[in-house]
Image (cartoon, helix red, strand yellow):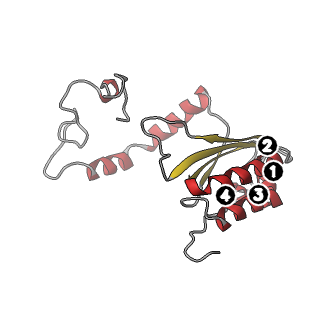
């Protein structure tokens, strides 16, 4: 490695698929974010072009896409960096692991590291299939039966000193003096409702 260069973790997380364990079955979805330095854009784009061509031909690859962030009010991309997200779908953890160990994937990682193309390590996460209404209802029931003790401890940590709080939310951090719910408040940008502003 070059001196003073932060080495990103392997972009496709060597061994990450095996972290799913032996019991993992079915499709594996990968979502990842790359914060690319503006000066690293040529290397990133060229390396990505090669990787996409090879990965889409890998056994078990059902989808392999790379998306640039669009301009919007809260965009991450700025004068110094551009955000790209990868969206992949593999038929199995084994297929993903074969891709991760492939020469094109390792070459992609090496190009990004050698040329210091990224601001920091990419973030990658593995996900299961999309959830339907039944699965969401089941998760909600499981969470409800687990109780809210952990939530109460977290909420207590955010309560201002000396305030007792109340069932209506008075005295809690984030309580509103207005009767208008947060989700209905109008942002200063374009008059749209937003909880993110």
Report if the CB atoms under discs 4 and 2 are less than 8 Å apart: no
- Residue under label 4: 11
**Front disc: 1 or 4:** 4
Q: Quadrant of residue 90?
A: top right
Check if mark 2's residue and mark 1's residue have beta carbons within 8 Å: yes
| Residue marked by disc 1 | 95
Q: To which residue does mark 2 refer?
A: 91
Measure the C-alpha gap from mark 2 to mark 1.
7 Å
Label 3 residue SS: helix
- In depth, the one of 90 and 75 nearer the eye is 75
Residue under the point 83% across and 49% down: 54
Per the image, label 1 sits on a secondary structure element best described as: helix
Q: Is residue 142 above or below residue 183?
A: below
Which sits earlier in the primary sequence, circle 4 or circle 2? 4
Q: Nearer the viewer, residue 91 or 185?
A: 185
Q: Position of residue 75 (x, y in %)?
A: 47, 41
Of marks 2 and 3, which one's residue comes earlier in the chain?
Answer: 2
Q: CA distance from mark 3 to mark 1?
A: 13 Å
């Amino acid at each position: 490695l070059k001196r003073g260069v932060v080495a990103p973790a392997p972009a496709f997380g060597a061994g990450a698929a095996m972290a799913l364990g032996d019991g993992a079955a079915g499709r594996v979805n990968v979502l990842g974010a790359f914060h690319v330095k503006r000066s690293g854009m040529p290397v990133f784009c060229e390396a990505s072009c090669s990787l996409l061509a090879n990965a889409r031909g890998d056994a078990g690859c059902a989808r392999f896409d790379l998306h640039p962030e669009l301009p919007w009010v809260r965009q991450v991309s700025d004068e110094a960096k551009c955000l790209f997200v990868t969206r992949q779908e593999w038929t199995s953890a084994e297929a993903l692991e074969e891709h991760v160990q492939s020469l094109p994937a390792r070459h992609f990682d090496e190009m990004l590291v050698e040329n210091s193309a990224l601001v920091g390590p990419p973030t990658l996460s593995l996900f299961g299939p999309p959830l339907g209404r039944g699965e969401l209802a089941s998760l909600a029931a499981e969470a409800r039966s687990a109780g809210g003790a952990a939530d109460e401890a977290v909420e207590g940590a955010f309560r201002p000193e000396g305030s007792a709080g109340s069932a209506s939310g008075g005295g809690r951090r984030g309580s509103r003096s207005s009767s208008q719910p947060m989700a209905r408040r109008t942002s200063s940008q374009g008059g749209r409702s937003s909880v993110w502003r």
